[in-house]
Amino acid sequence: MTSGAVPGAADELPDDVSFEIPDDLSGLSMFGETTSKPTVALVLTQVAGADPLAAVCAVAKLEVDVFFAQGVGAVAVCRDLDGDGPAQVAAGISQLISGVPAILVERRENQITATRWLDGERGDDVPAGLLLDGAPDDLEGLLLGTHTLADVKGVLQAGQYSRLKAARLLTSLARKARKKS
């Protein structure tokens, strides 16, 4: 036998079967990741209120909505989900709140991923299941797609603050923090 063909193998396939091999395999990854746009991207912080985080985001000109999740901290919901928009938000927040990690959580095609950011730099991946364990209903609902931002109470738009008003708020909060310590 000169060819490596299996005798009779061609006879087992029906004639009407066609195979299509895609020209672009860039959407596939050996690790199961996808290159699709996330359906939601949140940045979890340890900031103790929505107002301070909204002010920080206004100073950094980040397009986010912010709410406070009890037991977690202030959460920034990314408006720009294209390209590296969520990563830019996580980098910007973690850079302005230096020394305190922020967690970027994204849902893409029903898969949730989480990455730690510190001082503007991407860090290690975090098991997403640990983030959902004991998470407040609003946060869990946004990540799982059972809630929308309209369902969450106390949402602030970072754009509602001018940069001057945001700077004044942050200065006032810093003074109060110094007086307490």
Image (cartoon, rainbow, N blue to C red):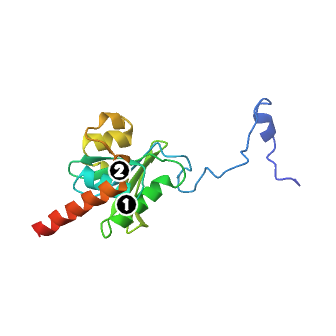
Q: Given the current orientation, which residue lies at the most extreme front position?
A: 164
* For marks 1 and 2 on the same chain, the one whose residue lies earlier in the sequence: 2
Q: Tell me the residue at 52%/52% (across/down).
A: 33
Q: Position of residue 127 (x, y in %)?
A: 36, 56
Q: Are marks 1 and 2 in contact (CB under 8 Å)?
A: yes
Q: Circle 2: is it few (<14), some (14-19), or many (20+) Cα within 10 Å? A: many
Taking the image as drawn, is residue 73 in sight? no
Q: Which residue is mark 2?
A: 76
Distance of label 1 from label 2 (alpha carbons): 9 Å
Q: Amino acid at mark 1?
A: Ile
- SS at circle 1: helix
Question: Which residue appears at 32% of the width and 52% of the height?
Answer: 54
Q: Quadrant of residue 14?
A: top right
Report which residue position mark 1 lands on. 93
User: In terms of depth relative to the viewer, which is nearer, 173 or 53?
Assistant: 173
Callout 2, which amino acid? Ala
